[in-house]
Amino acid sequence: MRRALAGIAEGVLAAIICVPEATAQTPLGDRQPVPPESTVVVMLGTGTPRPLPDVMGPATAVVVGSRVFLFDVGLGVERRLAGAALPINGVTAAFITHMHSDHTLGLPDLIFSSWTFGRTRPFPVYGPKGLSAMLTHLYEAYQEDIAHREIEYGVRGGYQVNPYEIEPGIVFDSGEVRVTAFAVEHGAWRQAFGYRIDTPTRSIVISGDTRPSEELVRMATGVDVLIHEVHPAAVRQIGNRPNINWEDYIARYHTTSIQLGAIAARAKPKLLVVYHKVVAHLPTSSWLISAERLQAES
Ligand SMILES: [Zn+2]
Ligand SMILES: [Zn+2]
């Protein structure tokens, strides 16, 4: 592994792949048109349920040429797409890892804001069981807005998206981009997915929320980029609910940085990006590492 535990700033390109060196670390909007096979990963949101003012909910864009594949739809997603100079009028496809609210709270934003800003056609949304019902209820919740805008825009139904409730396997394969969903283990959730994305030039795995997963190690072995959640084992109390044993919760639902180190040592991705950090208000990965070191020494 050439680089490990890469700390990232949200809204900054976490991994710029297949673009000339001179354009690295420049916003997408400042770049010249890129070749259709180029692959860029943009960390749009790296947060958790905690409403930190500067960190948005989980959302990762994999941009292949001009196509935008979105993984999870956390709060603030449309604003972050705008910040990265990516289209705000709809994505090529969206993929949900699991139905926890921090990963889906941006869904009405993605659907209705993209419609407001010119979307006329549905795009596919892939995810676990419950996705179709959530969309039906969202349309119902926003029926007053929908009714008014349909009159204003003179078009009926333009807000809709096409939901696909998926099982593990290849869920998208078009134009040399293949997306494979695989099962991960996230506490009591019946369905939680990680995704592997294979483009003409790169391979990327996104963990979603998971405790250490053998299937993830298998899918991520040798990939170019592994984007993995991380929780600090050293923090005992992370939430405001004293009746929850957070150490036990993290063991069942999440991956500590020590466990992630072991996973990365086995999978050997070329680049490891950590996200969904519970202690995102403590901003650097070096803090995570030093916290774990303290724990290991105590
Ligand atoms: Zn989460
Ligand atoms: Zn979760």
Image: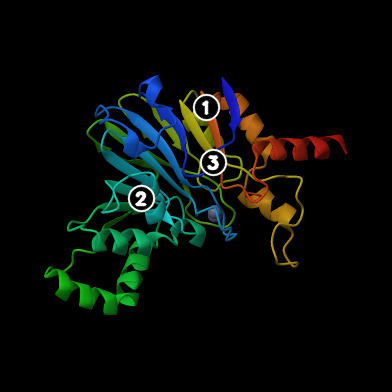
Q: Which of 209 and 116 is in front in this view?
A: 116
Place residue 37 in its image quadrant.
Answer: top left
| Quarter of the rendering occupied by the C terminus | top right
Q: CA–CA distance between discs 2 and 1?
A: 26 Å
Give residue 84's mark.
none
Task: Give the mark toward the camera: 2 or 1.
Answer: 2
- The amino acid at mark 2 is Ala
Q: How crowded is mark 2: few (under 14 residues within 10 Å), some or many (20 or more)?
A: some
Give the residue type at disc 3.
Ala
The percent coordinates of residue 218 (x first, y second) are 50, 30
Q: Is residue 194 visible?
A: no
- Ligand 2 is found in which quarter of the picture? bottom right
State the residue position of label 2. 82
Q: Are marks 3 and 1 in contact (CB under 8 Å)?
A: no
Which residue bears the numbered disc 3? Answer: 9
Q: Earlier along the polypeptide chain: callout 2 or callout 1?
A: 2
Relative to 161, residue 83 above or below: above
Tell me the amino acid under the disc marked 1: Leu
Q: Is residue 141 above or below residue 43?
A: below
The residue shown at (32%, 32%) is 31
Say whether residue 1 is left or right of residue 234: left
The answer to whether residue 11 is above or below residue 158 is above
Residue 261 % position (x, y): 65, 31
Q: Camera-side residue: 158 or 242?
A: 158
> Is residue 60 visible in the rendered structure shown here?
yes
- Under circle 3, the secondary element is loop
